[in-house]
Each structure stands twice: as C-alpha cells, then as structure tokens.
Image: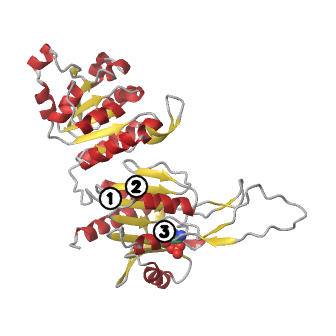
Amino acid sequence: MNGKRILLIIGGGIAAYKSLDLIRRLRERGASVRCVLTEGGAQFVTPLSVAALSEQPVYTDLFSLKDETEMGHIRLSREADALLVCPATADLLAKMTAGLAGDLASTLLLATDKPVLAVPAMNVRMWEHAATKRNVAQLRADGVAVMEPTEGPMACGEFGPGRLPDVPDIVNWVAGQLSDAPKPLAGVKALVTAGPTHEPIDPVRYIANRSSGKQGYAVAEALAKLGASVTLVSGPTALPAPAGVARINVETARDMAEACQKALPVDLAVCVAAVADWRVEASAQKIKKGADGTPQLTFIENPDILATLSQSNAMRPRLVVGFAAETENVIQHAQAKIARKGCDWIVANDVSPATGIMGGERNAVHIITPTNVESWPEAAKADVATLLAERIAHALAEPR
Ligand code: C5P
C-alpha cells in the first residue's frame, strides 16, 4: 500500500475503537490515512486521538466554514486513492445505498469517483435483517467492495456474524483490494464447499471423516484474491474464515446441500468438501448400552451436491469443479466420476494414509477434464489453490 492515500470514514458503532489501531496498521504498511468522523463515530472515538494517530487534520462537519475554506469536501474525496468506511454501520450502509448526502461522510461517499471499500460491523440481528442484506447486495452491485464481518461474541452480549474482522485481516483485505495485480475473477460469483460433514447417530454421537477443510478454505481464499465474490459453505472445521469470504457454517450433508441451493445462482462452483455419502437414521435419544444388544445403524444415501449442481438445468454454474479423494486407481476413478456426476473438471488426489494429504499442509493433484489429465507436482495446499484459481479464471475468460 506504499504511498496509497486512504480516506477513512469512521462510523458510529462500538467497533469504532478498533479504527485507531487500523490507522496505525495502515500507516505501517505505507499508506497515508486522512480521517472523517461521522457524528456517531465522534461519540466513540475523539477527533484528537484520530488526529494524533493519523497525523492529519480530522474532518467531521459538512458545514464547517474553516474546513471548507481550507480543504473543501469535494477535494477531500478527490485527493484520496480510495475511501474506506470502517466500521460501516447499518445506518451508513443504508445512506450509501440510497445515495443520501446529508452529512460530510455520506456527501463524500456520493461525490467520489474512487474505489469505495466498506467493512460492516453491527449487531447480528441488524446484519441479518432483510434491509441490510438488500443494501449490501445493492452496494456490491454498485461496485462497492464489502468485507464480510466475522462471527463471534459481540459487545452487545449476543453471538453471531456482524463483528468487525480483526484489524490485520482488514489491512490485508484493503491491501488486496487496492493492489494493482489483475483481478480476472472480478464480478464472478463463486460457491465453494469445504470440510467434512457430521452425521448424527444420536444427540451426542456422530459420524465424521478426517477432512480438515484446509484445501477448500485455500481455494476460497485464492478465488477471492482474484476478485471473485465467494460464498464458502463449510462443514465443522477449526479454521478461521478467509478474509473477504462469506462463510456459511453447516453440519450435515443435507444442511450443506440446502445452503448451496440458497447460494445459487453462481458462475462457478468448486466442491471440495468431503461430504458423507451416507447418514444414519438418528435416534432422538442417546442410544443406551443394555439388553437390546449391539445397536444396528441403518444407512440412508445423502444428496450428492456436486451432481445436483452439475445436472441442474436452470441454474447450472458455468463451471463446476469437483474434488476426488481416492486411495487407489486415482485417475480412473476420477474420470468415471466426471461422467457420472456431470461436472466439468475433477481435481483428484491420493489420500492413502502414507501420503499425509488428509489433514496435512501439502497436496499432489491431477486435474482431470473429460478429454485431458494433467498431473501437478506436490505443493503446499495454498499454492495448489492459487494455481487452480488461475486455471479457473482462464477457463471462465474463454467465450461461452
Ligand atoms: O463421490 P465422491 O464422494 O468421491 O465425490 C467427491 C466429489 O463430490 C467432491 O467434489 C465432493 O465435494 C462431492 N460430493 C458432494 N456431495 C456428496 C458427495 C460428494 O458434493 N454427497
């Protein structure tokens, strides 16, 4: 971010206190930061702290004679390389969506022709309200980059999505947004599944598998870095959501299938999750040891998400990529899988315990299409993801 001039608009939410650290971290990365406080923002952080940390005057008032003669609000937004709204409150997002210009912050946001980045933070109910969802969707359609809030305990005592992401993650996201690197997947909506699924046996036991989610999370992050707007539907994992990716947490294969359907339409689907092929008829009560002898589990086949996405007529993504974890005849099984499921590519890997791939940091994959097999050398899962995202960008750039 060396030399980048950021106009930081600090909205009036409790997360505003983190903007002080944000100013420092952005400056450490070489950006210069000029700040605007909304009326609400000034209730949470003082102009003095903001001025001291940014080492620049702070602007708060649209009708300040002094500010207008010295700077002028139009110049304030013209002299920035980007406008960063953090925290972006529900109120600010609504004003931006409607194009209101009743105070300095909203006027600057309407008067700018520079990239606008917004980092929302608010109570979970406000974030999940239909009005906020509508506003965020509209802002994204208008070209505003909106970072996904994280999930966790909130200052208001509730728990859920709506928290301001950690400051280092915001800085990385902003750096990615402002980087001059090409964004070949800008405007592409992507769905990624990752992790295992948990299939309950009774209220306390479940069937799972050894998937860590690392490869799927790396794919989601790599696609987002190339500019895609990514929804990551994740089974239970210990991983934090990658910056700039909307994560939906699920537990069972059926939950995952439902979340994927809700995410449609998308341009691209990459199914990395190790979805349980079967669930069992779960007992409503904990199964007890006792006179009935060994319990019998009855297996029922789960919906196949990859096959459903590949075969859906109305909403088939332009490119559907599956993964195949095999322990023998990797390529032959993967080729058969393309034909059976109807996806475009399969990324196949050997997950025999000796390979250390399942749960590990590295992967060796074969990219299989109906007409071609390409074997990539072993690499870190993040590097496999980057190469795959580049390959996907290339494929989506080709005329339909
Ligand atoms: O048939 P198999 O499980 O080996 O296929 C693996 C591929 O299919 C992966 O891409 C996985 O995410 C996907 N899959 C799915 N839904 C299932 C089973 C597998 O999406 N129920």
Q: Position of residue 163 (x, y in %)?
A: 44, 37
Tag 2 near tag 1, CB within 8 Å: yes
Q: On the image, numbered disc 3 is attached to which residue?
A: 305
Q: Quadrant of residue 133?
A: top left
* Rendered view: 213 above or below 150: below
Q: What kind of element bears circle 1?
A: strand
Disc 2 target residue:
231
Residue where numbered disc 1 is placed: 189
Q: Is residue 203 visible?
A: yes
User: What residue do we see at 22% from left, 72% from top?
Assistant: 398
Which quadrant of the rendered structure holds the N terminus?
top left
Q: Amino acid at mark 3?
A: Ile
Say which amino acid is labelled 1. Lys
Q: Would you call the spot at circle 3 few (<14 residues within 10 Å), some (14-19), or many (20 or more)?
A: many
Q: Tell me if residue 325 comes above or below residue 22 in the rendering.
A: below
Q: Residues within 10 Å of mark 2 (few under 14, many from 20)?
A: many
Q: Earlier in the sequence, mark 3 or mark 1?
A: 1
Cβ of mark 1 under 8 A from ligand 1: no
